[in-house]
Image (spheres, rainbow, N blue to C red):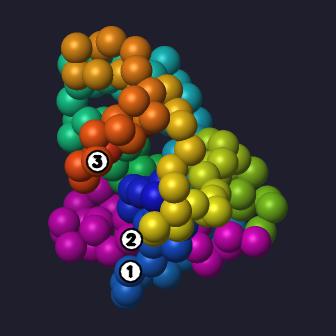
Amino acid sequence: MGMYHSTSGNCGFEPYEKPTRCTMDKQVLIQTLQLEEGLRNCQETQDAYTQALHNQDLLHLATITERLQIRALVQTGVILPSSSSQDVKQALIALHNARFQYAQDPTVNAITVYQRQNRSRQGTLRLGDAAPDVPLFTTEDEPTSLAKYDSWNKPLVLIVGSAS
């Protein structure tokens, strides 16, 4: 499945890119990404992320990230504090698209944690393949394994994810 989130620049294993009328030159982009990374790592932001995770509020996690990205865009002059919501949206799209536009640029990729730490890769498992046995937990938090469900001879849907 890969990583999916518009702010990471990925949709599964494909680039997440949307059309936008906003453009940033590479130096402004680098400055914006550096500011974003600094804001993301500051104690106030980390505390906000921790609280949102504690409350299992994934929507608030996205809001925290969007706010710090807007702040970085304002501080680098890409948008003004008084910019319309449409201009802000276009600037955010341009920022998110940059992960695709500079995907092969080690300088740009070294700046943000979501590029440095993106280890999602397309595996070899395909539709129709036998799934390997893996450890699982029931909804009652009891350990089990995928092989234990194999004997059911019924369709099985696994819903998995990560909040990290």
**Mark 1 or mark 2, which has the lower sequence index?**
1
Residue contact at pointers 1 and 2, CB within 8 angstroms: yes
Q: Residues within 10 Å of mark 3 (few under 14, many from 20)?
A: few
Can you identify the residue that label 2 sits on? 93
Quarter of image, res 82: bottom left
The secondary structure that most of the magenta stretch takes on is helix
- Where residue 53 appears, as percent x and y from the top left, is 32, 23
**Magenta highlight on residue 99:** yes
Quarter of image, res 101: bottom right
Which segment did they paint magenta? 78-104
- Residue 153 tag number: 3
Between 25 and 145, the residue placed more toward the observer is 145
Q: Residue at x 43, y 35 (%)?
A: 146
Can you identify the residue that label 1 sits on? 18
- Where residue 142 appears, as percent x and y from the top left, is 33, 12
Q: Residue at x 68, y 70 (%)?
A: 103
Q: Amino acid at mark 1?
A: Lys
Q: Element type at marker 2?
A: helix
Q: Residues within 10 Å of mark 1 (few under 14, many from 20)?
A: few
Residue contact at pointers 3 and 2, CB within 8 angstroms: no
Give how far apart the Cα atoms at labels 3 and 1 are: 42 Å
Closer to the camera: disc 3 or disc 2? 3
Instruction: Answer left or right for 157 relative to 38.
Output: left
Between 22 and 156, the residue placed more toward the observer is 156
